[in-house]
Image (spheres, coloured by chain):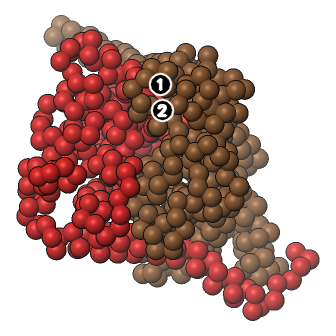
Chain colours: A red, B brown
Amino acid sequence: MKTRTPRYLENSLQAVFFMCAAISAVTTVAVIGILAVETWGFLQQISLVEFLFGTRWSPLLHPKSYGLLPLLAGTTLIVVGASLVALPVGLASAIFLSEYASERTRNILKPVLEVLAGIPTVVYGFFALTFVTPLLRIVLPDTHVFNAASAAIVVGIMVLPMVASLCDDAFRAVPDNLREGAYSLGATSFEVTTRIVVPAGLSGVFAAFVLAISRAIGETMAVTLAAGATPNLTMNPLESIQTMTAYIVQVSLGDTPAGTLTYQTLFAVASVLFLVTLCLNIAANIIMKRFQEVYE
Amino acid sequence: MIAQSNLAWRHKKAMFFRCFCIGVTAFAVFILGLLIYQVSVLGLPWLDAQFLSSFPSRFPEKAGIKSALLGTLWLVSMTAAIAIPVGVLASVYLEEYARPTRLTEFININIANLAGVPSIVYGMLGLAIFVRFFQLERSLLSGALTMSLLILPVIIIAAKEAIRAVPGSLRQAAFAVGATRWQVIRAHVLPSALPGILTGVILAISRAIGETAPLIMIGALTYVAFVPEGPMDEFTALPIQIFNWTSRPQEEFHELASAGIVVLLLVLLMMNALAVYIRYRGTRAK
């Protein structure tokens, strides 16, 4: 380098870089702080027991009621449905990618997966509403126009690339000599996959599953568009429901003045959302680290 | 005999399993292809110069995405201008300067966790801090700041990985001839990590282009019949416009939405192609 940087500049540069890195910590503190303050304000008026165990959610219409269970049930329905789609299909695709696909197929499919993972969620919402729901209504005529099943299927399709990609990474990390050892003992490809590769990559597979569930919980646009806006304590996927995220969107589409109880419900619901996804993400990290098989 | 038939059965099972995995993968790819086909068939007839150069309207045949497209352009440029420098410098700090202290470890874990926070929670943060506390209102600046916080973890994680992949010998050689830490970073580490950083940055920006929920939270408007002229103007964005059209009951608006989706997907596809190309060139150079 011809240009010389003075020493004081060297040091101040380091300080600037540190500030950039510290922004992430500040973000976390801000998120927790804001959620905590508004939720605290909410809990001054509605007891925690009523909030967590109440069976009716109706903060906008009289008689008002603030029981979270219907929203939790809605989110659960979406998560279960999406998992039923994404986990088996994602796992099978990952096995195909890492065990059966030729290098050429892989080189095509991997970028395709990346592109698919980048499709905006609002597009999946459109797909649910204009394609999956009409199809469901042909097969099962008593399906509501807005229903949990359609949204769940689409959320499953949405997280599928992520599951496939993470599981594939886990399987690729299993060293080839384990496979070769099993093959040389006469195992078939099915046995190698189910008894060697999948068990060896199990920590990665579980982590992928947990992350997929966390994504499905936080998914917003597809469920807002396709699952409806009726907080409904039901386990029937053909009915209209509302998830936690969809409620937040519904309220913020209107104009809610700050400081009102309705405004605070947003943050109370978001707190639950944040805590649940945070726990799942931390769990995924722990699974990944603690149960990872290390090969030399 | 028994062993033989058993072997045949085992091979059959393996065969079946192989076909099953191939079939499932093919089906998944087919469904996703169907999605794109479906949207294109609905949307392409609407996609013309008039659609790109008109404001939204109550009348489907007059409606267009001018304000949404320009809003997205503004939003993404501003987000990039904020998030890329901050993200890259943060990763330089974490990889090149930070000693392995508790604080560093906390920041690293924290970034990984932030990447998993639902985007709508970032929307709440933007609403409470930028829109309400700093009184930036429903401006482009609020949107860009919120979006920046959202994509920062993505950029930092990708950039850190790229910087970590730069061989230590390169740094040691530069230090050995008397370069300072910043000179090493500027002249050697950053240039050789550039393809990896760029790939991560492009993917993060694509995410910002498609995000809808946080913008709804901070109150980006669904009906905007003007072009934003500065960072303090109100705005709409392409995904918001798509959401708005999709949530209307009339069939024509669904067709408009799919035309909007085609535009959005084309933009994203081009960005992805660019990322793949840069990575391909990067790996070939090594």
Residue B203 visible? The answer is no
Q: Chain of mark 1?
A: B
Quarter containing the N terminus of chain A: bottom right
Q: Tag 1 or tag 2, which sits nearer the N-term? A: 2
Q: Chain of mark 2?
A: B
Q: Amino acid at mark 1?
A: His
Residue lying at 39% horizontally and 26% vertically, measured from the top left: B249
Tag shown at residue B245: 2
Residue A174, quarter of picture: top left
Q: Amino acid at mark 2?
A: Trp
- Is residue B121 toward the left or the right of residue A140 in the image? right
Quarter containing the C terminus of chain A: bottom left
Residues at circles 2 and 1 in contact by the CB criterion of under 8 Å: yes
Q: Is residue A211 above or below residue A51?
A: above
The residue carrying pointer 1 sits among few (fewer than 14), some (14 to 19) or many (20 or more) residues within 10 Å by Cα, namely many
Q: Measured from the top left, where is residue A281 in percent x and y?
A: 33, 57
Q: Nearer the viewer, residue B267 or B216?
A: B216
- Is residue A238 toward the left or the right of residue A171 in the image? left
